Image (tube, rainbow, N blue to C red):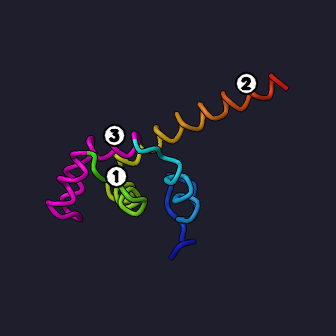
Amino acid sequence: PVNSPVNGGNKRISQKDLLFLIESLTREDREKIFNKFSDDFKEIMSRAAIYKHSKGWTHLRNDRILWLMENNPEAREFILKLLKERAEKILELVEKLEEDD
């Protein structure tokens, strides 16, 4: 279910909220995730799909990233780090814009 809780350590957020975060990942972020954890995707993706991803012809869908986060704690930490870096950059830019006002 879309609003089912997803364990985030000792906090819980809905799957909908987690998907909201995943949607903010860039194409480059998705490539980094695939390149680092490509072996994990062999369980759920065809050889053709793996090949297309490895060549950069297609990028990870949100549901595949969600699956990875639910099945690989190391990947979860890696993805959370990417999200934190993106959030920090956004906050930095917003603060600079506010200074200009």
- Name which of mark 2 and mark 3 comes first in the sequence: 3
Kindly state the secondary structure of the residue where label 2 is placed.
Answer: helix
On the image, numbered disc 1 is attached to which residue? 59
**Residue type pointed to by label 1:** His
Q: Position of residue 53 (x, y in %)?
A: 25, 51
Membership of 31 in magenta stretch: yes
Residue situated in front as seen by the camera: 101 or 63: 101
Q: How far from the left and from the top, in percent, is residue 12? A: 57, 59
Badge 3 element: helix
Question: Quadrant location of the C terminus?
Answer: top right
Question: How many other residues sit within 10 Å of disc 1, few (<14), some (14-19) or many (≥20)?
Answer: many
Q: CA distance from mark 1 to mark 3?
A: 10 Å
Q: CA distance from mark 1 to mark 2?
A: 32 Å
**Extreme-left residue of the structure:** 47
The residue nearer to you, when weighing 15 against 94, is: 94
| Of 30 and 70, the residue lying toward us | 30
**What residue span does the magenta drawing correspond to?**
28-55
Amino acid type, callout 3: Lys
Q: In the image, 74: left or right of 4?
A: left
In the picture shown, does residue 101 fall above or below 55?
Answer: above
Q: Residue at label 3?
A: 32
Q: Mark 2 sits on what residue?
A: 96
Choose between 70 and 56: the one closer to the eye. 56
Position of 76 with respect to 34 (left or right) is: right
Residue at image coords 51%, 54%: 23
- 94 in relation to 54, above or below: above
Callout 2 environment at 10 Å: few (<14), some (14 to 19), or many (20+)?
few
| SS of the residue under disc 1 | loop
Q: Are marks 1 and 3 in contact (CB under 8 Å)?
A: no
Nearest to N terminus: mark 1 or mark 2: 1
- The residue at 20%/62% (across/down) is 43
Can residue 74 be seen here?
no
